[in-house]
Amino acid sequence: MKKMSCLQSGRPPPEESDGFDYPGGIPVTYSQHRLMHFDCDDKNPRYAYPQLVKLYAKLGVHRYNLLEGKNLKFCNLKSFNMRINCGASSYYITLDARSGFQKFPFQVLVNERRIGCLDLDVSIARPRVSPKPYLRRHCEPVRLDTEFNPLPDWPLAFSDAKRFYMVNESELQNNGWISLYLELALVSHIRKLTDHYLAQLEIVQVAVETLDDVKPPTLDSKNVVIYIAYRDFAKAETGEPCVSKAIIRRTFNEATGGLKFVGDYWSEEKKTLSTETASVDEVTEKRSMHLSGDEKTEKRCKEEETFRMKMQI
């Protein structure tokens, strides 16, 4: 069977692509990085961490809604291209979004800055247009902001109304991105978490602190810190603490158009102590245990090498 040229197929040459919609993947460039293509329409899709990819896709739709003032809904994943390298990766995702009764293809680019934690940048989120939706040459690497600022500590109280906005129950129900942020914070740490596990999370309190010069803060602020207290009933079933907290920071770069997310979570462990052991086993707020950065990268590299061998890359 004669292969169609890029021009006949409606796709640009690989060297002019910005990474989307290449079923065969894109050959190695001078940077020695390439993209691997995955289809998501199959009943049993063959790719690692499907929950993470779906959350990335939803995050892209959220970015578009936030910045464009729209109300698009995520429908389903179509395909994605993943940059193959050890450590943090980039995901060029094509999905179906919906506005009212209209369903259409949508493209999202998520760039991980670190692995094993929520630290990423969403630089593209747009409806796919034809024939040329391409914004830059694929061989031009994405320039990420490498500066890392640590997350703030959990506040002692949220009583300052000029600093914090307390989200009520109806607002929590109408702003699904809050639970999306929480799920991303967890799945970014443990990529194999399932829908069943995430369904057992119950948000009990949300406070929003704006980083913009806006007093009082609002849910629509682009630069915010979200403080979430939640119950983890899955952990409660195993005897582990179920009262947990998460912090997610969202910042928007006006110059690059990138929306950056950094987040972490931990469990609050409470014990009834005897006077003899109180000095040793005090009530503490215990951070969830994670591997060091080097250990995470080594573990991720081994997982990806095993996965590539299975896919016969």
Image (cartoon, grey):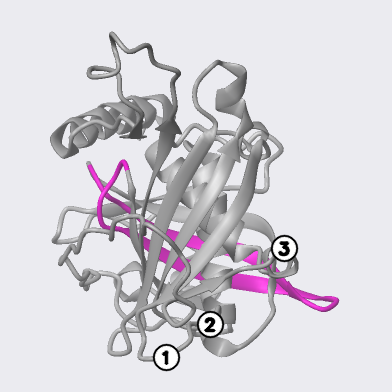
Q: Looking at the picture, which amino acid does disc 1 mark?
A: Val
Q: Looking at the picture, which amino acid does disc 3 mark?
A: Glu
Q: Disc 2 to disc 3, how far (Cα)?
A: 15 Å
Q: Disc 2 to disc 1, how far (Cα)?
A: 8 Å
Q: Is residue 267 magenta?
A: no
State the residue position of label 1: 214
Quadrant housing residue 135: bottom left
In screen coordinates, is 125 left or right of 89?
Answer: right
Q: Position of residue 312 (x, y in %)?
A: 38, 29
**Do the residues under discs 2 and 1 have CB atoms within 8 angstroms?**
yes
State the residue position of label 2: 218
Relative depth, front residue between 151 and 163: 163
Q: Disc 3 to disc 1, how far (Cα)?
A: 23 Å
Q: Position of residue 143 (x, y in %)?
A: 20, 72
Relative depth, front residue between 179 and 202: 202
State the residue position of label 3: 169
Residue range highlighted in magenta: 87-116
Residue found at the very far top of the displayed protein: 276
Q: Position of residue 281 (x, y in %)?
A: 29, 18
Quadrant housing residue 152: bottom left
Q: Position of residue 126 (x, y in %)?
A: 53, 79
For label 3, the crowd category at 10 Å Cα-Cα, with few meaning under 14, some 14 to 19 and many 20 or more, is few
Q: Looking at the picture, which amino acid does disc 2 mark?
A: Thr
